[in-house]
Amino acid sequence: AQTVTQSQPEMSVQEAETVTLSCTYDTSENNYYLFWYKQPPSRQMILVIRQEAYKQQNATENRFSVNFQKAAKSFSLKISDSQLGDTAMYFCAFMKLGAGNMLTFGGGTRLMVKP
Amino acid sequence: DVKVTQSSRYLVKRTGEKVFLECVQDMDHENMFWYRQDPGLGLRLIYFSYDVKMKEKGDIPEGYSVSREKKERFSLILESASTNQTSMYLCASSLPGQGMDYGYTFGSGTRLTVV
């Protein structure tokens, strides 16, 4: 079974600054996907970024980028130029390829962006 | 705009009641999922379904059952609600291969309180 750990229950950052959210996972699989989801107060889960394990290049989506370290089983999310709208819960998730393509989530990090 | 709709945003039920949580998607997705979200624990998979009338247990199926009679509808059933089932319940759906590329589409959640 896979496990996903987010060691930072809460974080805060000043507007326009950069923040990094940590995520580690444990798996014996070699092929898998990793995701970061954002859940704002509206509760709607939004996909932020994804990474295929077979790709060495780190994924980037505008102000969001990841640092994927496969050997270390680490998948951190960096948010640059933080904006007030980035205030949300952030969940790291692991997807093993196979029946159902189920997601396994970490415990979440609550991020507060301060003006 | 594609949607996953959960019938209730907030629900209060009494201990011992039979509770139905409904989820409908309009995207013709084969895969549907029910997650439970609790602080510090993230999202945990209760059940998923990869086709009509098909269901598979997730990580925490005890006390729950599901029904999928039509492709677009996936119901979560609490046979006899208990206070430890007070939680946020999230429904999600995906196409079998698309989940890897685009993640899941989530509903907005049902916050269930059992008193």
Image (tube, coloured by chain):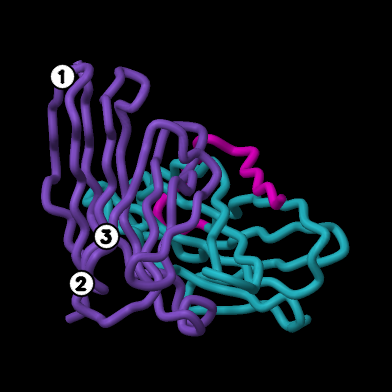
Mark 1–mark 3 distance (CA, rounded to whole Å): 23 Å
Residue located beneath label 3 in the image = B74
**Mark nearer the viewer, 2 or 3:** 3
A16 sits to left or right of B9: right
Q: Colour of chain B?
A: purple
Q: Amino acid at mark 2?
A: Lys
Q: Which mark is residue B14?
A: 1
Residue located beneath label 2 in the image = B3
* Residue drawn where x is 51% and y is 72% of the image: A49
The chain carrying label 1 is B
Element under disc 2: loop
Residue at mark 1 shares a chain with residue at mark 2:
yes
* Residue drawn where x is 25% and y is 81% of the image: B27
Percent across and percent down for residue A40 are 30, 52
Percent across and percent down for residue A38 are 40, 58
Was residue A62 drawn as part of the magenta stretch in this picture? no
Mark 2–mark 3 distance (CA, rounded to whole Å): 14 Å
Earlier residue among tags 2 and 3: 2
Residue at mark 2 shares a chain with residue at mark 3:
yes
Percent across and percent down for residue A48 are 45, 68
Q: Amino acid at mark 3?
A: Phe
* Residue drawn where x is 74% and y is 83% of the image: A55
Was residue A7 drawn as part of the magenta stretch in this picture? yes
